[in-house]
């Protein structure tokens, strides 16, 4: 009989995700956790024309170059190329991240007769714009039904999303929240990154209250346009907004800033690696997480940026999304907007800093969030899932 400890060290997990890997910190943490647990890990993602370089990691990575970068052709090309690649590379366990990689990942697992684990990062069919594209939604719905009919091991990001999938498919998913490490676990900055940060820091005034909004996938439903317009109602001598990320709306934000002469109030920084993002977050005085609840996927989400802010000791101003409202109220680390009118957002920001004692209390309370809600605790759930997979598929 093969010893469990020996087989565990030799298991290869192939992890698939459609992102270019640079800013997908959830996937990175899970891969790192599995690597440190003794698995061999190979992470596969995409490489697009605007993708930045990927630093070496503890585990192996591979990025598939694509000709298409938008629309249905992008998803189709990635899954075809991914499937062909996976046919030649057999794993002991497959881990697919989100529905858009599952056609290729599940088919490969079936062909190789190996177990499949599904990490649903969101309520996929509730994404922004999906209800306006009925044909696309029908296709993804059919794919999702097929996935949930066959997949045995699945987990997701929040209680609310888990409940939605249980309602739809009578499937009980585990919850693995996307929490930061309690102790800073980022790689050291390279000399080039240090130079880049030094240049960017020159645009960020040291004597003002820094407001920050993170977001690798900014779109019209994230409240970001309204946030930019809110700066028209804030004192330039007191406040500066820092937006770090990317997405469909980023070019639109650049135009709004120029058209309204907001260059002195707002700094836009394209998406950056985890380490650089953390550097900017720790300079902020207030984190913004104001996704609109009109989109079902947002309404029940638990945004990554919420925890990134709180772990950096930054209180938050947020919209009333079910999951993040629960966290903010429980730990008393911020407050909420009641609508997305720019004047209202500006008013709430002003009120926060007119009460410095309350802001200081919120900041102090972020320490409890860091101590209780961290990846060092959450990672145990991931380890248990893959140990279960191993126990139920062990070969004698």
Image (tube, rainbow, N blue to C red):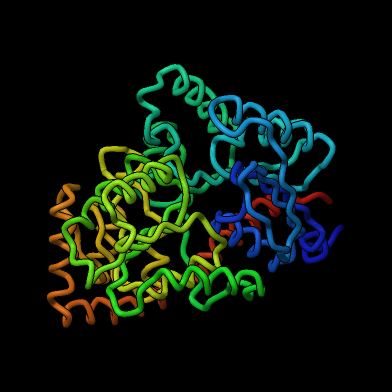
Please say whether residue 393 is visible from this viewpoint. no
Q: Position of residue 55 (x, y in %)?
A: 69, 62
Q: Is residue 252 left or right of residue 321?
A: right
Residue at position x 44%, y 43% in the image: 122
Outermost residue toward the top in this view: 135
Residue at position x 70%, y 47% in the image: 44
Q: Position of residue 24 (x, y in %)?
A: 56, 54
Q: Position of residue 274 (x, y in %)?
A: 55, 64
* Nearest to the observer: residue 369 or residue 237: 237
Please say whether residue 392 is visible from this viewpoint. yes
Residue at position x 56%, y 25% in the image: 72
**Quadrant location, the N terminus:** bottom right
Relative to residue 270, is residue 363 depicted above or below?
Answer: below
Q: Quadrant of residue 29?
A: bottom right
Q: Is residue 352 left or right of residue 208?
A: left
Residue at position x 36%, y 48% in the image: 301
State how many labels appear: 0
Relative to residue 263, is residue 367 depicted above or below?
Answer: below
Relative to residue 106, is residue 142 depicted above or below?
Answer: above
Q: Is residue 356 left or right of residue 82?
A: left
* Nearest to the observer: residue 28 or residue 48: 48
Q: Quadrant of residue 203?
A: bottom left
Q: Quadrant of residue 369?
A: bottom left
Q: Position of residue 202 (x, y in %)?
A: 45, 73
């Amino acid at each position: 009989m093969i010893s469990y400890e020996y087989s565990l060290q030799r298991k290869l997990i192939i992890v698939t995700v459609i992102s270019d890997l640079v800013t997908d910190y959830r996937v990175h943490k899970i891969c790192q956790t599995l690597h440190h647990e003794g698995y061999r890990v190979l992470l596969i993602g995409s490489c697009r024309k605007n993708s930045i370089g990927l630093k070496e990691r503890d585990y192996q990575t591979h990025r598939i170059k694509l000709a298409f970068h938008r629309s249905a052709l992008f998803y189709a090309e990635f899954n075809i190329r991914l499937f062909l690649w996976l046919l030649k590379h057999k794993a002991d366990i497959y881990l697919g991240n989100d529905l858009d990689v599952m056609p290729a990942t599940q088919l490969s697992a079936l062909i190789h007769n190996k177990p499949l684990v599904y990490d649903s990062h969101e309520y996929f069919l509730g994404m922004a714009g999906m209800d306006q594209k009925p044909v696309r939604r029908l296709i993804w719905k059919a794919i999702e039904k097929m996935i949930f009919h066959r997949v045995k091991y699945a987990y997701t990001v929040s209680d609310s999303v888990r409940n939605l999938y249980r309602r739809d498919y009578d499937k009980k998913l585990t919850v693995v929240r996307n929490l930061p490490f309690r102790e800073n676990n980022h790689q050291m900055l390279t000399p080039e990154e240090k130079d880049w940060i030094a240049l960017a820091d020159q645009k960020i005034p040291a004597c003002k209250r820094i407001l920050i909004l993170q977001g690798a996938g900014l779109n019209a439903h994230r409240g970001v346009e309204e946030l930019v317009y809110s700066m028209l109602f804030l004192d330039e001598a007191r406040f500066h907004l820092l937006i770090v990320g990317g997405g469909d709306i980023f070019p639109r934000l650049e135009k709004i800033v120029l058209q309204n002469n907001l260059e002195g109030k707002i700094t836009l920084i394209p998406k950056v690696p985890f380490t650089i993002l953390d550097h900017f977050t720790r300079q902020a005085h207030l984190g913004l997480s104001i996704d609109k609840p009109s989109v079902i996927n947002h309404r029940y989400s638990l945004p990554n940026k919420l925890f990134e802010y709180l772990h950096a000791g930054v209180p938050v101003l947020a919209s009333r999304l079910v999951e993040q409202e629960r966290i903010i109220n429980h730990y008393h680390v911020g407050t909420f907007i009641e609508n997305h009118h720019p004047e209202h957002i500006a008013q709430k920001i002003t009120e926060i800093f007119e009460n410095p004692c309350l802001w200081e209390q919120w900041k102090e309370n972020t320490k409890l969030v860091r101590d209780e809600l961290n990846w060092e605790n959450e990672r145990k759930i991931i380890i248990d899932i893959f140990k279960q997979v191993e126990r139920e598929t062990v070969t004698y």
